[in-house]
Structure formats: C-alpha cells, structure tokens
Amino acid sequence: MRTPLPAQVSPPPAAPATGGGAAAPDKRRGAAEKAGAGRRDPYFDNAKYLAIVLVAAAHAWEPFWDDSRAATALYLFVYTFHMPAFIMISGYFSRGFTFTPHRVKRLVTGVAVPYVVFQTAYALFRRWAHDEPDYPVDLFDPWFVMWFLLALCCWRLLTPVWERLRWPVTTSVVIAVLVSVSPDIGHELELQRVLRFMPFFVIGLMLRPEHFALVRRRSARLLAVPVVLGALAFAYWAAPRMNHQWLFLRDAAQDLGVGAPTGVAMSLAMLVCSLVLSACFLAWVPGRRLWCTALGAGTLYGFLLHGFLVKGSRWWGWYDPEWVHTPVGMVAVTLIAAAVVTVLCTPPVRRALRFVVEPRMDWLFPRQPGRHRRSPEAAASGGTR
C-alpha cells in the first residue's frame, strides 16, 4: 500500500528526532542511509505482502461471522492488527515528507488520483453488480477500502507537523481517544477512522531501524508465541460477547451503546492490543528474500483491486452453498482470497494498470531538474510512488 497502506537496509530520509521537537538530523546516519538507499530490504517487502494477504483474507471471512465461534474469534484476532501494522509501515516510509515539487507530485499521482479513480470505479461497480442504479459517486464518502487512501493522503500532509511536535505520539493518541467519544463528528470523509487510526501512522513516523531490529530478535519471536496464543484464547472468549464494530474504528462509543468512560477505556485497550499484536506480526516476518518478496512492491494494487471480488462474491451468491459455511469452506475461501490478492500484486497486473494506480501525469507537473530517475527513497519504499 504506498504502502498504500505500506528499511533496515534502505530506510527513507531521516526525520527529526522524536523526543524534543525539531532536532537536527544525524549526519552519520543520513550518510549511511543514503549509501544504501538504492537497495530494497526484503523484510519490508515481505511484511507488506503478508499484511495485504491478511487484509484480503479478513475481508473474505466477513460472511462467516455467525457460522461459528472459532471463525468469529479468528476474524477478531486478525482484524485487531492487520491494518495497524500496514499503517505503521506506511508511516515509516512517509518519514521526511516535505512539500517539495517531487513529493507533492508523488502524493497526487500515487494517492490522490487513485482515490478519485477507484472511488468512482467502486460506485459504478456497485450500481452494476448490486443493482443500485442510483448509488451516488461521492468523493466525500469513501466506500469500503477507499477510506485508507483518503486517510493516507491526510496523514502524509500532516507529516511535517508531527515531526516537529514535542510529543507527537501522545498528541495523536489523545486526539484519537477524544474522537472516539465524539459522535457529532459523524461519518463524513470517514473522519472517525482517519483520526482514530492516525496514532499508528504517527508511531510509524517515529520508528527507526533499531526498533525493527528489536522485534526481529529471536527472543522477541519466541515471546510472540505465548502472546499470540493468549490473544487467540481471549478472542475466542470475546467472540460472543464483543461487538465487532469496535474493530473498525468508525463509530463513536455512544453509537455503540456505551458511555464515554467505557468508550475511552475501549479505545485505549484496542490501541494497546493492536500495537502488541502488530509487534508480534512484525517479529515473525521473514527477513530473507522469498518467492513472495517482489510482490511487496505491488500491495497497493492488491489492496485497491481485491475489493471488487470481495463485494461481488457476496452480491453474486458465491457464499450461498452450504458447504462454503463449513470449516473446509472457510479454508477454501481463505486460500482463494490469498491467491487472488497475490495475483493482483504481480508485475503483469501492475504493468497493465499502472496508468490508473500510479499515473505519471507529466503533463500536469513541470519537469524538475535532476528528477529524470526514480528517487532513492521511492526505490526503498517499495516501488510505488
């Protein structure tokens, strides 16, 4: 996912230090990063690919909510961390964003334009596939997965602000918690989601290669085992008791039938759980080059395109056969979702659809001196602009 939704060998340009406002960059670290900027770290490509597979699988599991407690528990477990982890990686590769002509062009062509194109495409698809001829094309009401591109655009525009605040993470958490008990914000522009997922993006901005090195230690991988097992057990306990709408971060606490104190507690609890499970996920991501490593550069394609099949499969009755709602059926659906999103991340699909997902649009932007080649940070961030 420019991601979106998004290295130890080749990190992006260094951002200001996290703790004391706008500190001067570390020159030695900057030189080292510049030296390795042309190389890709397979760890992050693997992380992006595995995250997008989890996104597609979780979307494919939604019709199984009421089939079994185990299926619901698995859905709750994955939904707790798959987007937070993706967003933190997106934030990590947004470090140092400034309003230079080249970066503004990348934001417009790599985020804003795909949002307009696919928000329109999803509306037209819904008109045709779901027999809703009057469904509006509304750019201010993102539908399904499109909220992420809108959020990514907003978060990235605010990057210079977050990198200059004294306590950026704390500030973003306070905003997210306050929003969680503010029903008057409503659903316009998905502001609930944009602001409540924002702490994960800000945390990603503040991460450094040494933080990823910590979770990649063998001790961290071993510690993740009991944590994940405990989380699965808790999800199984919570499955019949918890409203799964808490996971989507799109409704205020009052809209879910609880008071402000409970809403604040739930928001903080969900934040902590998401961070812990995201760390467990990142601890298990392989750091070596695998068969799927190259697919990490195409996760934006998989993210934007898999939604057509996810929604169409329900509208066209693919979940209607009884065998689908069995353990074997759920496994089959999971494998199909993983296979489809894998294909959508492949180079042939990227070449065919680059004109809408990553348009060059040179006609709109004047040529910048020294920008004839792709920038090192673009190469390091995963290939998408």
Image (tube, helix red, strand yellow):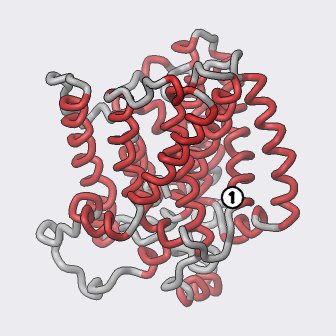
Quadrant for residue 317, please give it. Answer: top left
Q: What is the tally of numbered marks visible in this picture?
A: 1
Quadrant for residue 320, please give it. Answer: top left
* Label 1 SS: helix
- Residue furthest to the left in view is 363
Q: Quadrant of the C terminus?
A: bottom left
Residue 36 image offset from top left, x and y in percent: 56, 86
Q: On the image, numbered disc 1 is attached to which residue?
A: 282
Quadrant for residue 221, please give it. Answer: bottom right
Q: Is residue 173 left or right of residue 233?
A: left
Residue 320 visible within the image:
yes
Pointer 1: residues within 10 angstroms few (<14), some, or many (20+)? many
Residue 161 image offset from top left, x and y in percent: 48, 54
The answer to which of 116 and 309 lies nearer the viewer is 309
Residue 211 image offset from top left, x and y in percent: 72, 65
Residue occupying image coordinates x 79% and y 30%: 234
Residue occupying image coordinates x 54% and y 60%: 48
Q: Is residue 31 left or right of residue 140?
A: right
Residue occupying image coordinates x 52% and y 75%: 13
The answer to which of 313 and 75 lies nearer the viewer is 313
Q: Quadrant of the N terminus?
A: bottom left
Q: 156 above or below 177?
A: below
Q: Which kind of residue does numbered mark 1 sit on?
A: Leu
Residue 24 visible within the image:
no
Residue occupying image coordinates x 72% and y 39%: 272
Q: 255 above or below 195?
A: above
